[in-house]
Amino acid sequence: MSERYSAQQIEAKWQQQWEQTDIDAASDDDARPPYYCLVMFPYPSGNLHMGHVRNYCLGDAVARYKRMQGFNVLHPIGWDAFGLPAENAAIKHHRPPAEWTYANIEQMRGQLKRLGLSYDWHREIATCHPDYYRWEQWLFTRLMQKGLAYQKEAEVNWCDPCHTVLANEQVVDGVCWRCDTPVIRKNLKQWFIRITDYAEELLNDLDQLTGWPEKVIGMQRNWIGKSSGAEVAFGLEDSEQTLDIFTTRPDTLMGVTYMAVAAGHPLAVQAAEHNPELAAFLDECSRISTKEADVETMEKRGMPTGINAIHPISGEQIPVWVANFVLMGYGTGAVMSVPAHDQRDFEFANKYGLPIKQVIQPSEGDWDIATAAFTDAGVLINSEQFDGLTSNDAKQAITRWLSNHNCGGERIQYRLRDWLVSRQRYWGAPIPVIHCDDCGAVAVPDEQLPVELPTDLQPTGGASPLCECDAFKHVDCPQCGRAARRELDTFDTFMESSWYMNRYTSPRDSEAMVDAEAMQRWAPVDQYIGGVEHAVLHLLYARFYHKLMRDAGLFSSEQGGDEPFKNLLTQGMVLKDGAKMSKSKGNTVDPNAIIEHFGADTARLFTLFAAPPDRDLEWNDAGVEGAHRFLSRVWRLLQRLDSEGNSEGGINNSDKTDAAAVKAMRRDIHATIRKVTHAFEHGFAFNVAIAALMELANSLQAFRPTGAAGNAAYREGLQALAAMLAPFAPHFACEIGDRLGMKQMAVVSDWPQVDESALEQDEITLVVQIQGKKRGDITIAKTASQDEAMAAAQADPAIRKWLDGMQVVKVILVPGRLLNIVVKPA
RNA sequence: GCCGGAGUGGUGAAAUUGGUAGACACGCUGGAUUCAAAAUCCAGUGGCUUCACGGCCGUGCCGGUUCGACUCCGGCCUCCGGUACCA
C-alpha cells in the first residue's frame, strides 16, 4: 500500500518527540565543544513574516548541522519586547501595552514552534521583563559613576508622531527610521552614553571581524568616520578669544583667505546682535530642513560677520563669514577656507569675490588655479618657511609649529557622536535616576533596582502616561532623603537588544547581569544571523555594549572576547514581485498559510533553496510547490523500498548484482556528502547543498538496485539523504530515518562521513579539448599517462577529425579533468 | 564624490576558485498513464544554423595575460546598498 506524504501528521509527531526528549537544550556541563548560533531576536508584533521565517530557518540549519557534527549547541530565542508599536496598539485597543505584548509573544512562540525550530526554550527571554531590564539599569548606574553616561542639553532629533527624540543612527535621510516623518531639531536635556570614548576601539576592532561581510565593516567604518588632521586656533581681532577649527589639510594653512562658521556658532550669534541682516540670515539657516535631497541642491550661501580672525603664522587679518554649509554638529562648527585647494571653498570664493591664494603646486606639471581648485597633494609655495616641502612633510611641520606656538596641534576627529538613549516613551525600561533639587541627578542604588515600569498604564498618544503616574513619579532622594522626582524618560529599545546575546549564556542569573563562567563557555557568538538593516544600529551598539560590559568587570577579554559576534551572516530580504513584502503594498505571503498547506518542512526547504542566504529572495509560489514535490519524491523512494515488503532482500530480488551500477551509486552518495558538507563549512550555500540533495534523489530514483549489494547501496543513499536533510527539513528527515530503521532520530544522528574509497574510480572520463574548445571525451584508466590519454584521443574519430592535417604543438593534461591539445596547420 | 556588492538562459540560480558555462529548480513544449482531470513518470528546452551528423556564437562593454578566462589584469557602462556640503 502506498502512503502519501502527509506533512501535518509527521510534523506534529516529531515536534512532540523533540519536546519530550528535550534534545534542543544547550548543556552547561558538557565535554563536547560549544557552539553558539544566534539569530536576531524578533520584535513581538504578533505575526511572523517571511523575513523572520528565512532568518530562523537559516539559523536552524546551522544549529542543527553543528549538533550533528558533535557540538554542544546554544541556539536561543527571545523577544525584543519594548517599543512603540505596543503603545500604538494599546491606544487603538484601549488595553495596556504589556497585555498586547505578552499575547503576541504567546502567538509568535506558537508559530516558531510550528516551524520546528530547534531552540532551547529554557533560555527564552523577554526584554520587557524586570528580570531582564534590571541589569541594564544596573549597568547604567555604573556608567554614570564612570562618567560614561551623562545628561546634557543638546540639539536633538525630535520625531513628532513618535513623540520622542531619536539617536543619530535612527535618523535616515533626515526622516525618522520608524515612521518616515522628517525630524525636527530641538533643544532638550537628554541622557547620552559616551560611545565616542570607544570610537577608536570600535574602529580598530573591526579588523578582528574577519567573519563579517566587508559591506558591514565598511558601513561601520564610515559611520565612525575617523579623520586625522590638525586643530588650529585662529586669533580674533580685538578679543582674547580664539576661533578654533579642525582641518585635514594643515599643509594648506598658508592659503587661508577667509573663515566660515556655522549659523549656530557663538561668533555668528554674537555678530548678529548688532546686525539685523545677518540675524535674518541666521534665522533662515536654522530653519532649513536636514533632508538629504534639500542639502544636495541647496545653494551655498554666506554672509560676512564683520569680524576678523588673525592667521596664527602670518598674522594676517582673515574675514570671518557665516556659511550655510558649515555644520555646527561636526568638528568645532567652524572651518578655515582655502579656495585654491578645496573645490567647495573655490566656488564660494568665486561667488563672493573672495581672494584665492595658491600654496600647493603639483610636483609635476602646471595647474591653472583660475579654472579649478587643486585638491591633490603636491609641493608648497607662497608659504614662507614651509616652501618646498611636500604636502605630507608640510602637514607634520606645520602641525608641529602650531603645537610649539601653543595655537593648535594634532587632532583626530570622529563623525560618530554620543548615543542618545533617553526616550519620551512609556513602554520601555525606566532610566534608573532620581532627580533631587539638592543632589541633582542621582543614580538609583542597587538595592532599589529594578525600577519597575508600571504595566497597567494606558498610553494616550501624547506625553508618556508615566508623567501622570504619581505613584511612580514621587520618590525620596536616595542621598538626602528629601522628596524628589523619578526620571520619566525610558531607554531607547536598542539598549535591550545590545546585550541579549550575552544574557542568553546565563539567562536566569539573579545575581549578576551575566555569569563570567557562562560567558567563557559560550561567548562570543560563533555565528550571528540577521538582516543587514542593522549594520550601523544594533550591530554597532551591541559591539559597544559588549565592551562596556567587559570594562564593567562582568567578564574579561579572555572570557567573553572583545567582540560579541565572531561571524556574521546578513541575509537578504524576501521580495514579492520585486518589492519588499509589506502590508501597505499588499504583497505579503502569510507563513501560516504555507505551513498549513505544504508543511513546515516545505516552507523551510524553499526559503533555503530559492536563493543564496545573503541575496534577496524572490518569493515564488511555483517554487514552493517544487520544494514540496521534492519531498514527495523522496517519500516515494522510501515507498519503493516498502512496497516489496522486505527491506532486506532488495527491490528486485535477483541473484546477479550490477557491480558497476552499485559502484556508481555509492560514488554519487559520497560525492553528495562531500558537497553538502562543503556547503556548510564554506559560506552556507544552502541553495547549492539542497540542489545536491535533489541530484542524489534523482540518481536514487534512476537506480535499479539488484541483489543484496544493490539494495544496501540504495538504503545507504536513503539514509545519507535523511541525515543530510535533517538541518533543512527536520521532521521529514526524522520520519524517513525512522522508517529506514535508523537507531537515532535523524536530527541527532552523526553527520554522514565521506567514504573516500567509494569515490575512487578506476576509469575516468576525460574531456578532450582542441585549442581550448571541447571536442569530445574519452574514458580512460585513472592512472593513464599523458601519452596514453593522447593515444586514446587520437583513436576517437570525433576527435581525430580535428587533428587531421594538423601538427600537435603542445599537450596539456589536467589529471582527472581534461586533455587540451594545441595544434597548428602542418 | 567616496566605500561595498552585483551584472550569466524565459525565471531563481550553479560552476570544486584558471579547466566541459548554464548543475538543481521553476516555467514552457511534446509524450506516457487516465473516460477525463489531478498526481506521477519519460523526453526536450541559451541563441543562430543544418534534413541530419554537425558547426558557429554566447557569462554587461572594450582590450590584455594564458594552451585555456564567468573567474586574473587594465579601461569603461549599468543597477543596487551605504555615506557625505565631514572641513
Image: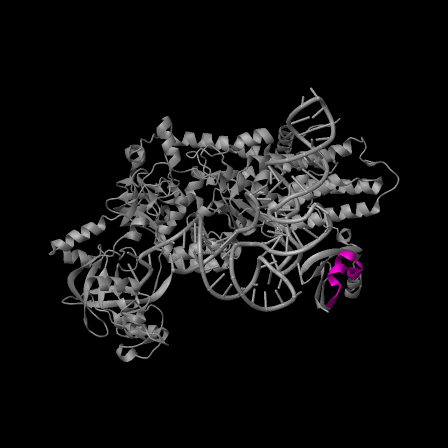
Residue A605: percent from left, percent from top: 60, 39
Q: Is residue A443 above or below residue A112?
A: below
Specify whether A596 is left or right of A388.
Answer: right
Residue A691: percent from left, percent from top: 64, 44
| Of A758 and A166, the residue lying toward us | A758
The stretch of residues the image draws in magenta is: A792-807
Q: Is residue A487 visible?
A: yes
Q: Is residue A67 visible?
A: no
Specify whether A781 is left or right of A809.
Answer: right
Residue A762: percent from left, percent from top: 80, 55
| Quadrant of res A735 | top right
Q: Is residue A519 magenta?
A: no
Q: Is residue A290 above or below residue A341?
A: above
> Which quarter of the rendered picture does the C terminus of chain A lie within?
bottom right
> Which quarter of the rendered picture does the N terminus of chain A lie within?
top right
| Of A118 and A145, the residue lying toward us | A118
